[in-house]
Amino acid sequence: MDLIEPHLKFSPSGLLTPQHWGLILAEGPDAGTFLQGQLTNDVLLLPEGQARFAGYCSAKGRLLGSFVVLKISKEKYLMVCHQDLLQAMVKRLSMFVMRAKLKISDASALYDIRGLLGETALLACPALKEAAPWQARQEGETYFVKLHNALNAGTQVQRLIWLGLKGEASSAAFLNQLYPNITDEAWQLAEVLSGISMVQTATAEAFVPQMLNYESVDGVSFKKGCYPGQEVVARSQFRGTLKRRAFIVSCTAPMLVGQEIFSSEDAEQACGMVSSASKFEPIEGQAPEWWGIASLQLSATEHALQLGHAGGPSLMLKSLPYPLLEDL
């Protein structure tokens, strides 16, 4: 299947204080071993000051949430998740702590978080320019984490997360003064163009990790020990039963997270769901477009796709900025 690469008049650079991100702190002597038994990726052997991407599944292998996990120290891990899932994630993870020596808490009041995009990301942390995704760099008591780049018109758009303790030498205030602000819409469009969806309330329990390509962006380890849903995730990978994948899509009509997608071949049964969405307004006088990531049945991608219902607005498939990991 030959897909066209996104080609938008979109080259943002700037800083964002993201309202759609939340922060969870796992702290205590057993923090590493506890998270190792809960998440889809290996965080126990993660070097201090480094990051990983990971999912958090139900016993049925369905994603309840997803995190960018930063290991501050042996006993302290910070986890970035979608804000609308934060309290549910704190509550659910805390339920399984039992006698383990750690505490799971909302860290939003303790840490500042910023998103850096484009040229601003390069200026703020040039050391991560050529780094692989999920690599991190510590500068004093603050951290930069490299996210997957967005790809647009053949250009790699750098994306970074910055994390620091609130009030730490006014680091966040310094960043705010140093770099221009960007809009939430610009950041969310870059997220879509990176091809990676973070789980939200509207998509919780809708997907196994491979339906969002998590195994292809280093979000799943098939070598680590047990975690909830591991058997389902492993069976999907090793038995060649992957029938859904995530794709970048565009549409001329509004697109919402959680919205169903239909194929022209089946008007009754949805063939996919929107997992991320953003509005793009090209230039004044031109009609807006909506871009998103959709998890789709592979068989449906050979047919016309419609948003919301059979006969709904047409969807266009676009290429991903990373290769898909083949079934093992």
Image (cartoon, rainbow, N blue to C red):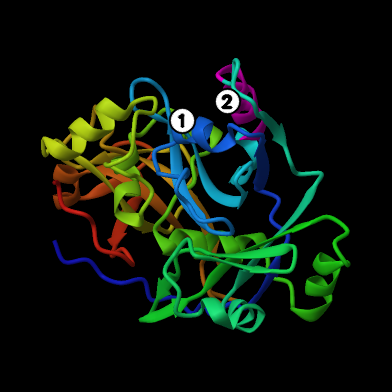
Q: Is residue 174 left or right of residue 133?
A: right
Name which quarter of the figure residue 149 lies in. bottom left
Does 45 sit above or below residue 237? below
Name which quarter of the figure residue 181 lies in. bottom right
Identified at 21% across, 50% down, the residue is 304
**Mark 2 secondary-structure assignment:** helix
Q: Which residue is mark 1?
A: 38
Does 11 sit above or below residue 1? below
Identified at 85% across, 62% down, the residue is 168
Residue 62: x and y in percent read 37, 28
Observer-nearest of 82 and 203: 82
Does residue 160 belong to the magenta stretch?
Answer: no
> For the magenta stretch, what is the residue range?
86-96
Q: Which residue is mark 2?
A: 93
Q: Is residue 289 visible?
A: no
Residue 215: x and y in percent read 30, 48
Q: CA distance from mark 1 to mark 2?
A: 8 Å
Does residue 91 belong to the magenta stretch?
Answer: yes
- What kind of secondary structure does the magenta stretch mostly adopt? helix
Mark 1 belongs to which amino acid? Answer: Gln
Q: Is residue 236 visible?
A: yes
User: Mark 2 or mark 1, which is nearer the start of the sequence?
Assistant: 1
Q: Is residue 8 left or right of residue 177?
A: left
Name which quarter of the figure residue 165 lies in. bottom right
The answer to the question of whether label 1 and label 2 lie on touching residues, with beta carbons closer than 8 A, is yes
Q: Is residue 324 left or right of residue 62?
A: left
Q: Is residue 122 left or right of residue 294?
A: right
Observer-nearest of 189 and 232: 232
Identified at 80% across, 46% down, the residue is 110
